[in-house]
Amino acid sequence: MGLLQKLLCLVFLVLFIVVLFSSPDTASASVEEANAFLKWKEPLANSSMLTTWILDPKKGSSSSASSPCNWFGVSCNVEGSVTRLNLTDSSISGTLETFPFLSFPNLAYVDLSMNQLYGPIPPEISSLPLVYLDLSSNEISGNIPPEIGLLTNLETLHLEENQLNGSIPREIGKLKSLSRLALYINSLSGPIPASLGNLSKLVYLYLFFNQLFGSIPEEIGKLNRLTELDLSYNQLSGSIPNEIGKLKGLERLNFETNNLSGSIPPSLGDLTNLTLLSLYKNQLSGFIPSELGNLKSLVNSDLDNNQLSGSIPAYFGNLLELENLDLSINRLSGPIAAGNLRELHQIETLELEQQHF
Ligand SMILES: *[C@@H]1O[C@H](CO)[C@@H](O)[C@H](O)[C@H]1NC(C)=O
Ligand SMILES: *[C@@H]1O[C@H](CO)[C@@H](O)[C@H](O)[C@H]1NC(C)=O
Ligand SMILES: *[C@@H]1O[C@H](CO)[C@@H](O)[C@H](O)[C@H]1NC(C)=O
Ligand SMILES: *[C@@H]1O[C@H](CO)[C@@H](O)[C@H](O)[C@H]1NC(C)=O
Ligand SMILES: *[C@@H]1O[C@H](CO)[C@@H](O)[C@H](O)[C@H]1NC(C)=O
Ligand SMILES: *[C@@H]1O[C@H](CO)[C@@H](O)[C@H](O)[C@H]1NC(C)=O
């Protein structure tokens, strides 16, 4: 070997050693994460599930003693850094305000549902690389922080069954990976932000049982992967946008118990995969459009408690899957097209009372 080659070998050896010793120290990374968890655990009311959340003194200073990776509800990647925290239904009572969000650079799945967490959602939650966040069925209050819009990897956001108030931040429309959004049973008020129309991957949207008002934004019609849309039990007003008819994959559409007015858009007849159509208890008027006769998959339809007029359309007789049809408490008149209704093979309930036959 010539001098040059020897020199090069030496340089490579030195480089190799430098790279080896400067590689991230996984043991100390997990110590940091373990301590961060312990700090959060401290004020939590005693949850028997967290008895594994201790540093094991028997193992002395070995890395497994100080790693949280075997703790209840915690999962790690091969480098020993925390990637998942699943403490669903674990009797945890406490607040997220003391959660050390900045200490977990790889925590992507968080399921803290069905506990007694209270207090607000800290904006710092946006520093996690979250793909999955479920804080449902707790007692979390305050607003949804606009910073939630920074979680651009988020695919699932479940915040239902809490005490969240204020309006839905328009920043939620920036969650471009989101496919599942559930905010039901809270005290959210204000309008549905038009920016939700940017969530092009959304499969379900559950906003029911809140105090949302204003009209349904026509931008909802851009959510072309949507299969379930439930806006029921709010105070939504205005008419049902025609654009809803573009949601061709929709299987369940529930707008019941709102304050929607105007007539039923004929475009709803394009939703041929629809199994549920509930418009119960609104202020809808006008005729029931003949296009609804195309809804061949329809199983349940509640159109009662509106001000619909005209005659009962005969085509309901062609909807072979239909089990429940409620048209009661409307202003429908004229003869029931008995010939067709006789062909309602599946039908279990048919409510027609209080009309003007
Ligand atoms: C948790 O339990 C220990 C002993 O079982 C008790 O000393 C401590 O006060 C309890 N902490 C809380 C927050 O209830
Ligand atoms: C959390 O664990 C429960 C069962 O213990 C499981 O049903 C649920 O899917 C898990 N959540 C996540 C996000 O993995
Ligand atoms: C939301 O609830 C908090 C208490 O949790 C209250 O202080 C705040 O005024 C409420 N905000 C709105 C907009 O209702
Ligand atoms: C998101 O939606 C809003 C309101 O519809 C719109 O003004 C904005 O341009 C959209 N942004 C993107 C990135 O599509
Ligand atoms: C309607 O449902 C069928 C059967 O599940 C499915 O193959 C089809 O893709 C759906 N249509 C749309 C537009 O999603
Ligand atoms: C429902 O809308 C009507 C007008 O269409 C309005 O007069 C009424 O106050 C609204 N009711 C509620 C509860 O928002």
Image (cartoon, helix red, strand yellow):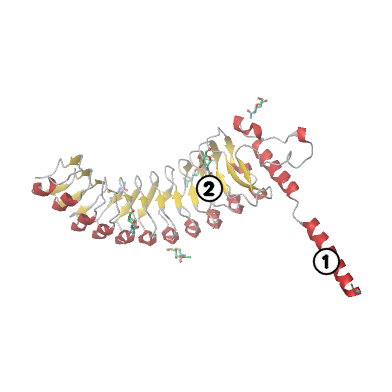
The residue depicted at 37 percent of the width and 51 percent of the height is: 228
Furthest toward the front, the residue is: 1
- The C terminus: image quadrant: top left
Visible in this render: residue 263?
A: no
Image spot of residue 125 (x, y percent): 59, 50
- Mark 2: amino acid: Leu
> 345 left or right of 175?
left
Q: Which residue is mark 2?
A: 133
Q: Is the residue marked by circle 2 packed among few (<14), some (14-19), or many (20+) residues within 10 Å?
A: many
Image spot of residue 332 (x, y percent): 14, 48
Q: Above or below — where is 226 with respect to 209?
A: below
Which element is circle 1 on? helix
Q: Which residue is mark 1?
A: 12
- Mark 1: amino acid: Phe
Q: Are marks 1 and 2 in contact (CB under 8 Å)?
A: no
Q: Earlier in the sequence, mark 1 or mark 2?
A: 1
The residue depicted at 44 percent of the width and 61 percent of the height is: 198
In the rendered image, which quarter is residue 265 located in? bottom left
Q: Nearer the viewer, residue 348 or 101?
A: 348
Visible in this render: residue 183?
A: yes
> 110 left or right of 304?
right
Image spot of residue 166 (x, y percent): 47, 48
Which element is circle 2 on? strand
The residue depicted at 46 percent of the width and 54 percent of the height is: 179
The residue depicted at 39 percent of the width and 49 percent of the height is: 212
